[in-house]
Image (spheres, rainbow, N blue to C red):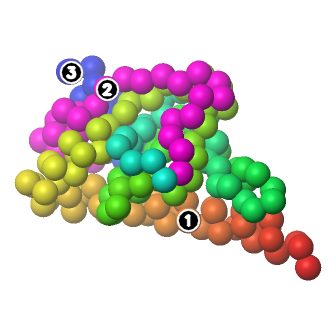
Amino acid sequence: MEGLERIVSEHRLFQGLGPEFVNLAAGCAKNVRFNADQYLFHAEEPADWIYLIRHGQVALEVATPGRGAAQFETLGEGDIVGLTWLLPPYRWGYDARATELVRAIALDAKCLRDKCEVDHDLGYALLKRFLPVLVQRLQAMRLQLLDVYGSAG
């Protein structure tokens, strides 16, 4: 597990966290890969994983009435895919699709939630790190929707 602990500790989301928190998070981690056009997840599915992208790009997409999928953000190395693991009902609000080969660290969301319930300091530290990413992602989606629907008048 030393390799995963090192990789997790070097990710910007976990940088500066104490080794005890990094070790707890790394205990929920595994290496994964997705081929081009493979979906990491679909909207409304259970939000069971958090992905720390190490290589490749992932398109975040939402279904738009009459227009199909609208890509609202592209994420790459160092980014995080999967934020709705934080709040019930723990379901994805969008699709995530690999646009090329993606290598990532997958964190088991239930494992991490359970550890946060036991160690509230860990939970608070992760919440402070995930919330800014969540706000930025919502802003990107809002801007994309304004672009799509704002010009229809």
Residue highlighted by disc 1: 138
* CA–CA distance in space, label 3 to label 1: 34 Å
Which residue: 29% across, 38% down? 108
* Dot in front, 3 or 1: 1
Looking at this view, is 20 or 48 the one in front? 48
Mark yes or no: residue 46 visible: yes
Residue highlighted by disc 2: 30
Left or right, 4 with respect to 77, comes to: left
Q: Magenta stretch containing residue 39, yes or no?
A: yes
Residue highlighted by disc 3: 2
User: Is 128 located above or below residue 103 in the figure?
Assistant: below
Horizontal and vertical percent position of residue 106 = 37, 33
Left or right, 24 with respect to 136, comes to: left
Looking at this view, is 77 or 29 the one in front? 29
* CA–CA distance in space, label 1 to label 2: 27 Å
Amino acid carrying label 3: it is Glu
Looking at this view, is 91 or 33 the one in front? 91
Q: Are marks 1 and 2 in contact (CB under 8 Å)?
A: no
Mark 3 or mark 2: name the one nearer the start of the chain.
3
Q: Magenta stretch containing residue 38, yes or no?
A: yes
Mark yes or no: residue 15 visible: no
Segment tinted magenta in the rendering: 15-43
Specify the quadrant that holds the N terminus: top left
User: Is 153 located above or below residue 109 in the figure?
Assistant: below
Mark 2 packing: few (<14 Cα in 10 Å), some, or many (20+)?
some
